[in-house]
Amino acid sequence: MKVDPMKLVPMEAALTDIPFLSLRDVNARYADELKAAAARVIDSGWYVLGDEVAAFEREFAAYCGASHAVGVGNGLDALSLILRGYKELGVLEEGDEVIVPGNTFIASFLAITENRLAAVPVEPDPVTFNLDPAGVEAAIGPRTRAIMAVHLYGQLADTSALTALARRHKLLLIEDAAQAHGAISGGRKAGAFGDAAAFSFFPTKNLGALGDGGAVVTGDAVLAQRIAALRNYGSDVKYRHLFQGLNSRLDEMQAAMLRVKLKHLDEDIAWRRRLARRYREGIRHARIQLPAVAREEQHVWHLFVVRCAHRDALQRHLLAHGIQAQVHYPVPPHRQPAYVALRNAYLPLTERLHDEVLSLPMGPTMSEDAADRVIEACQSFECPP
Ligand SMILES: *Cc1c(COP(=O)(O)O)cnc(C)c1O
């Protein structure tokens, strides 16, 4: 990964010497297995809702320690179908409120509003940037029916406090686990804490397909059945339509890819933890705040996010050293044009975080040498006056 000073390197190549994440490298490790899996699907002649999806659903449910997984088209649909499923079951009604972190990816909000439910954004915990149970409790009102706990950046939200809150106030606890496959607490994995959980297999996620994919994971057999019908035109048996469903299915090809990659997920997580530990030990800079971790096993480091009041300058400084850092996310959902109705929500910490967070390169194929170069570059950062 090091630039050889004796070799002439084109400018562009030098600038992205350490990419944020190389998907090509991630999948190249399993190229032979992936190609064999693809060939198996091609030869089978069956491409939608077949043996591969059924097998992946069993394997992923088992991995999460939950009884059911339902493969769907993507992570947003997984979230949305959970809420839709509860509507079909009469548990949720239009206009009901769902509490959601203000500093999440916009998909968490979209799933709520797509179902004509009301998103009630709350401020994060200032140290972990994850959902703050006290803030959640303060936001509970007469129409609150659910809490959407996002395991942001790959770190579990405070599941014990949130589970207790949900039980006390008779609320659904829904996990947005799109960034947290494999995060674990007290022997329980992401996806097995709430009433239902949504996963994304977008290629950049810790468990990524080679295209779009998602899954709902739940211990509730009735909800799982409902969602299995909803994803397939609302149909339980061919040409019988119980609900006005949609078409959002995980396809056989992606399920086959995911079955290969699921076998290696724990090794990938272990490597991410190793890089994260290196970053946390190596970066000692008065103006760069490192991510707070409750317990190692609770974080799977989908993103390694630091906070810096001079974020843009830090990002430029890293780029000048050939390091590509990214911002997750530059504008919070309530400040997006899509959500003018929420524009006046009072979320000062959320807004500040969006101006100050920076995600350092992180991934299962990043070398320790590359991490050391990122550390060096951070250490040499001089804050503008
Ligand atoms: C990626 C992501 C989603 C959406 O998943 P897609 O598969 O891209 O639709 C939802 N929530 C969070 C927190 C995510 O990071």
Image (tube, grey):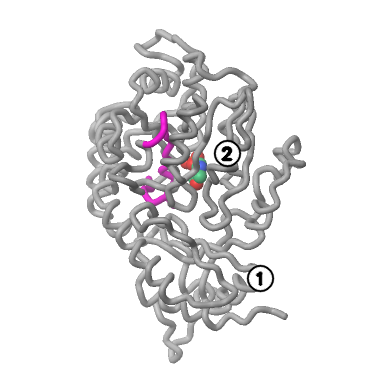
Report the predominant secondary structure element of the magenta stretch. Answer: loop
Which quadrant: the C terminus?
bottom right
Which amino acid lies under the numbered mark 1 shown in the image of this protein?
A: His
Residue 115 tag number: none
Whether residue 316 is visible: yes
Residue 294, percent across and down?
A: 42, 56
Residue 323, percent across and down?
A: 51, 73
Q: Is residue 293 above or below residue 79?
A: below
Magenta region includes residue 347: no
- The answer to whether residue 171 is left or right of residue 123 is left
> Sequence order check: which comes first, mark 2 or mark 1?
2
Residue 328, percent across and down?
A: 57, 55
Whether residue 116 is visible: no
* Rendered residue at 31%/57% (across/down): 268
What residue did someone put label 2 on?
136
- How far is disc 2 from disc 1 in space, using C-alphas? 30 Å
The residue stretch that appears in magenta: 193-209
Q: Secondary structure at mark 1?
A: loop
Which amino acid lies under the numbered mark 2 shown in the image of this protein?
A: Val
- The answer to whether residue 276 is left or right of residue 342 is left
Q: Is residue 331 above or below residue 40?
A: below
Residue 310 tag number: 1
Q: Secondary structure at mark 2?
A: helix
